[in-house]
Amino acid sequence: MISTSRLWAELSGISPELAAADSAAVDDWHADGADSASEDPEEEDDYPVLLRLAALGSSFAARVNRMSAWQREQLLGRLNEVLVSGPEHEQNAVATGFLEALVSAYDRGDFDLATIWHELGEESRHYIKLWNTRTGAAVPYWMTFREPPEPQPPGAAVALLRDSCDLLASADDRLLNTATEARSAEPDYDLEHRVENMASEFVRDFHEIDRASRAKVFEALEKVVLGAPEGDVAAVRERFVPALVAGCRRGVLHPMLILSGLGAHTAHCFKKVDDDMDRCGRG
């Protein structure tokens, strides 16, 4: 049976920084006299595993960008093993302590859970999705990927958007049929303007597009934002998303229809563009 005792013994070898934070958390717990209420001498030095794993989750979320892939793999792998086959009270502690600490940090905006989602074990991912369902929180689109998103090739923004909706493909064809001499030789001109053109079509004909096609468009945008080259990401971020925001501001689109359909990363771009427009308006 896997136990957290192995994790504590190996933590300094996995991440000296996390081990130091864990040691400080244990010292703080003792300094606060939290163990003084126990009448059992054998329990005097026991820092409750639930509190300890919750503190470890918070420390991990705060330091994840400074950890190597190997360090994350080792830590998350050991915790997933406990969640699968550890003592019941330790399984509960991993779930309600460590994993819920990660979700809380994500909800506060302190940490991007998507960046380590596929480094979590299958049982850990299952618990977080179950927790979201129980609490009524939306399950972000990236949680539905069974595998990490495939890296996308250059030009993926155009290809994925065309494939997602016939109306967008038709709009792109019309643009391509315009006189070539009117098109610029600037780098990424075609990519940016083709994405912008399809964005305009999407906003204009939004209410004529069936829900399944809308969902495919939102999925395409998220795939680009998650795994496409920077030029494609910029085209979505600077051309397609602003068109959605502008459509909402003009009353052509309802923000809830858009935000409820967008993936987490595209929705983040949407909110940032919206905030930037607010600041410009106030300025």
Image (tube, grey):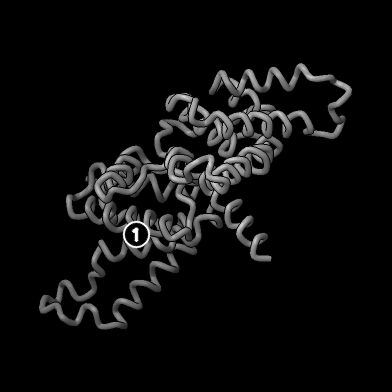
Q: Is 197 positioned to the left or the right of 12 in the image? A: right
x, y percent for residue 87: 19, 50
x, y percent for residue 34: 24, 79
Residue 221 in which image quadrant: top right
User: Which residue is rendered at x = 65% and y = 26% of the image?
Assistant: 158
x, y percent for residue 143: 41, 39
x, y percent for residue 23: 39, 70
Say if 150 sits above or below 115 in the image.
above
- Depth check, front residue: 140 or 101: 140
- Depth check, front residue: 93 or 189: 189
Q: How many marks?
A: 1
Residue 170 in which image quadrant: top right
Locate the C terminus by quadrant.
Answer: bottom right
Report the amino acid beneath label 1. Answer: Trp
SS at mark 1?
helix
Which residue matches tag 1?
Answer: 8
Say if 254 sits above or below 24 in the image.
above
